[in-house]
Image: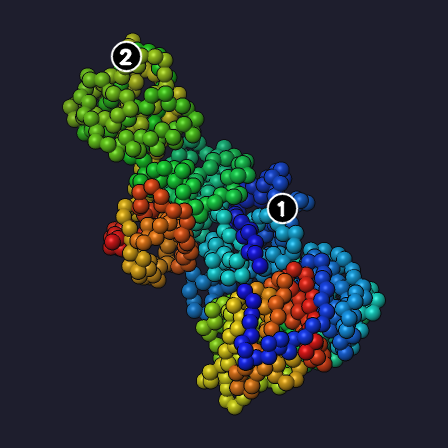
């Protein structure tokens, strides 16, 4: 079920031919280095790959980095290093240039499902079942949380020293250097995804019961957006903290935070996908959103500040859309798919 | 893109000590040519190299609406969602629950979560029962009752610790609670792998094939004795008992093993459904017929049985032999002890809240009325309805509509064409305090 653009849209759209490549298994996570020199991709079998950002030429490839496969990866803000996490309970610290593991960290006996670098690159946070730990850039442990009430489903740095975690019924904010819990937001529901607004005030979570729940940290007021046909596991905030794009079905629902919104306002509803949306990514500037779906369709949308928008480009991947990454200069978009495809378009 | 085949999942439940780990190890060590992933919740007990074993904390997630039917296992969603990404997928998933688990959330996970539902199909729920302790457990905990009620297969384990009579009684009680399940007896969880994998348990046809009368009431007889006889005339002598009459079916060529007894029992259910023939004291009892022996005259009464060749006969009697001091004697008056005895317990001797009911009706159903009735039933009683399955003849549909459900969650689709087979409806419910009469009437009202 391909996505087609209507006649009033530019027929080829903004997505222009770039390059494509393949990895060994389901392309599960990736990232661009600082200026888009390289694209690093990990697959579900534990393979790690680096491609030249412009040409797609293979820089290096490493197989079997994590027994059981990779679950998450994060590029260091400097762009020269990255971290991978896997089912083997380990985090590996790599150099981008050589593709060498510089440091191996045993986090725990469970799966390490999330990793994130602090914005200043000083710390790496990793979650393993109910616990989160933070490490220095040298791999030394600097902090570990108490057990959460259930497995940590998402983590994100809200500032250089503050880490947010989501689990069943709870979002927590930890002051990592002081090693203490700073704020706890609770709500009865299984939180499957989390995104923080770039201004730091809003935290939004997708919930198993087909709703999006969000809180404003300053007031601790919360709201629930329900009525999604499926669970909204894909969430994205734009860089101005105006728009929150949410998946959860075949439509992309965009809530606008301008004025007193989004409470009491009607969201923008982006209709073009024929199957459930799997992932969302905002470009850094210009209110451009990319979405991918289970049928492999990728759509780029141009949005207004009220959340309404129109498609400006579309393409189809060979497998389920897994992840989308805008190059830091927004001039290219990378898509990873379930069949191990890596596709990069010029914008 | 082509849709991949859904991976079948078996759920293994049972109280601590019922033998789940032994059974898991057996399955995994057997040559079955399958790549099995095991999701284990009682840590570190299974240690077999050829299977992928994942320890997961049982995380039962309730939703904000407070509805127990929406409760799912969050750990399964996460783990299974991730495992399915690998290209070298496995062919089968076994989920072991902790002893105290309510099977509802595990089963519901395969209905509630779209992504899981797209990749996996719930093949069956296997519940291990410790024959020596289950009676106490049933009395004490809702979980063990629910584990029995949800089962497609009940593995009655550790049967060597309990005598046959108690086992029969236990089996009858479990059957009362869950008539859909297949009961397998074993000593050390030593059951063939195909009794727990690839059950296709959600397929009612298979259940009906195994137990053609399972939709009918429980066995109308309480006792069976198998006697080896030579050709000749035998006397069946009965003393006064609690009732003024007793029904009986004599089966010729009866085997002595469990399977043979069950097979005849199913056959006798149908004989018992036929009108009984009165046989007065002093008369001969015909073989293979439903007969009624009037016992209202005082003192011992004798009836006669003639066989013209060496044969084993099975007596399927309405009451136990003990109640009427039933004796079979040869022409010389020497008593012939039964080679094998078995008691079948009638349904209403136990009053467990949990039970099964079946609706079986000919004719076509109005889809709109059915929707309205089922919708209301599940809304109001979904919490108490653990399992349901069946097939329905929808008006205007050339194929059978097959369905299954767990609590309020309902899943159905058209299956094979009716063809020449008579169009009819069969529904089975297992639940707590089911209101049989009103459910029967409710469904009848949906017929055109």
Residue placed furthest toward the bottom: A259
Q: Quadrant of the C terminus of chain A?
A: bottom right
Pinpoint the chain carrying mark 1.
B
* Relative side of B125 to A173, left or right: left
Residue that label 2 marks = B233
Rendering coords of residue A179 (x, y %): 68, 75
What residue is drawn where x is 60% and y is 65%?
A296
| Chain of the residue under the numbered disc 2 shown in the image | B
Residue A238: x and y in percent read 61, 82
Looking at the image, which is closer to me, B124 or B191? B124
Q: Residue A82 is drawn in which quadrant?
A: bottom right
Left-right relation of A182 to B138: right
Q: Which mark is residue B35?
A: 1
Mark 2, other Cα within 10 Å: few <14 / some 14–19 / many ≥20: some
Residue at position x 33%, y 50% in the image: B393
Location of the N terminus of chain A by quadrant is bottom right
């Amino acid at each position: 079920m391909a996505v087609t653009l209507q006649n009033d849209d530019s027929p080829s759209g903004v997505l222009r031919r770039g390059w494509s490549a393949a990895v060994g298994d389901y392309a599960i996570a990736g990232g661009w280095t600082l200026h888009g020199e390289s694209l690093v991709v990990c697959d579900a079998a534990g393979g790690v790959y680096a491609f030249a950002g412009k040409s797609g030429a293979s820089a290096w490839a490493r197989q079997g980095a994590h027994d059981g496969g990779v679950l998450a990866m994060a590029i260091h803000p400097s762009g020269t290093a990255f971290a991978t996490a896997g089912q083997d309970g380990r985090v590996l610290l790599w150099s981008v240039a050589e593709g060498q593991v510089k440091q191996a960290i045993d986090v725990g006996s469970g799966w390490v499902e999330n990793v994130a670098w602090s914005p200043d690159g000083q710390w790496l946070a990793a979650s393993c079942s109910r616990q989160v730990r933070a490490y220095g850039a040298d791999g030394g442990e600097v902090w570990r949380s108490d057990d959460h009430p259930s497995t940590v489903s998402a983590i994100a740095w809200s500032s250089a020293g503050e880490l947010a975690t989501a689990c069943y019924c709870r979002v927590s904010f930890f002051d990592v250097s002081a090693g203490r819990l700073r704020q706890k937001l609770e709500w009865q529901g299984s939180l499957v995804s989390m995104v923080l607004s770039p201004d730091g005030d809003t935290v939004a979570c997708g919930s198993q019961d087909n709703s999006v729940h969000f809180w404003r940290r300053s007031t601790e007021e919360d709201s629930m957006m329900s009525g999604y046909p499926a669970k909204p596991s894909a969430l994205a905030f734009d860089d101005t903290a105006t728009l929150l794009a949410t998946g959860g079905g075949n439509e992309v629902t965009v809530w606008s935070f301008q004025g007193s919104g989004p409470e009491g306002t009607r969201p923008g509803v982006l209709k073009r996908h024929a199957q459930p949306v799997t992932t969302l990514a905002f470009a850094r500037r210009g209110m451009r959103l990319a979405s991918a779906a289970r049928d492999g369709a990728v759509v780029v949308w141009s949005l207004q500040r009220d959340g309404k928008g129109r498609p400006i480009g579309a393409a189809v991947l060979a497998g389920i859309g897994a992840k989308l990454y805008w190059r830091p200069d927004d001039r290219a978009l990378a898509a990873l798919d379930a069949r191990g495809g890596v596709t990069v378009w010029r914008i | 893109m082509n849709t991949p085949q859904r991976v079948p999942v078996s759920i293994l439940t049972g109280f601590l000590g019922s033998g789940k780990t032994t059974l898991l190890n057996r399955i995994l060590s057997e040559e079955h040519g399958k790549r099995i992933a095991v999701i284990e919740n009682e840590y570190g007990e299974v240690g077999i190299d050829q299977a992928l074993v994942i320890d997961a904390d049982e995380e039962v997630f309730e939703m904000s609406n407070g509805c127990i039917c929406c409760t799912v296992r969050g750990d399964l969603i996460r783990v299974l969602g991730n495992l399915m990404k690998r290209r070298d997928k496995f062919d089968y998933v076994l989920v072991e629950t902790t002893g105290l688990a309510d099977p509802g959330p595990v089963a519901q996970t395969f209905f509630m979560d779209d992504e899981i539902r797209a990749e996996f199909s719930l093949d069956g729920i296997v519940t291990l029962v410790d024959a020596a302790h289950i009676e106490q457990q049933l009395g004490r905990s809702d979980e063990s009752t629910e584990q029995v009620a949800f089962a497609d297969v009940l593995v009655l384990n550790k049967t060597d610790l309990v005598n046959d009579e108690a086992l029969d009684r236990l089996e009858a009680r479990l059957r009362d609670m869950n008539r859909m399940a297949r009961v397998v007896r074993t000593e050390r969880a030593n059951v063939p792998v195909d009794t727990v994998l690839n059950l296709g348990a959600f397929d009612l046809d298979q259940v009906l094939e195994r137990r053609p009368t399972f939709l009918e009431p429980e066995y109308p007889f309480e006792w069976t004795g198998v006697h080896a006889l030579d050709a000749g005339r035998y006397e069946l002598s009965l003393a006064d008992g609690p009732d003024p009459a007793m029904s009986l079916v004599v089966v010729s060529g009866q085997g002595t093993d469990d399977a043979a007894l069950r097979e005849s029992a199913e056959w006798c259910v149908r004989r018992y459904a036929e009108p009984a023939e009165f046989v007065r004291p002093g008369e001969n009892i015909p073989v293979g017929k439903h007969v009624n022996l009037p016992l209202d005259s005082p003192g011992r009464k004798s009836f006669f049985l003639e066989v013209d060749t060496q044969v084993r006969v099975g007596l399927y009697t309405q009451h136990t032999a003990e109640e009427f001091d039933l004796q079979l004697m040869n022409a010389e008056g020497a008593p012939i002890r039964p080679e094998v005895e078995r008691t079948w317990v009638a349904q209403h001797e136990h009053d467990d809240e949990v039970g099964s009911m079946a609706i079986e009706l000919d004719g076509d159903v109005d889809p709109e009325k059915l929707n309205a009735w089922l919708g209301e039933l599940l809304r109001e009683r979904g919490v108490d309805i653990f399992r349901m399955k069946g097939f329905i003849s929808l008006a205007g549909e050339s194929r059978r509509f097959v369905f299954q459900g767990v609590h309020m969650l309902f899943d159905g689709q058209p299956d094979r064409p009716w063809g020449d087979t008579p169009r009819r409806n069969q529904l089975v419910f297992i639940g707590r305090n089911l209101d049989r009469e009103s459910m029967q009437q409710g469904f009848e009202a949906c017929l055109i």
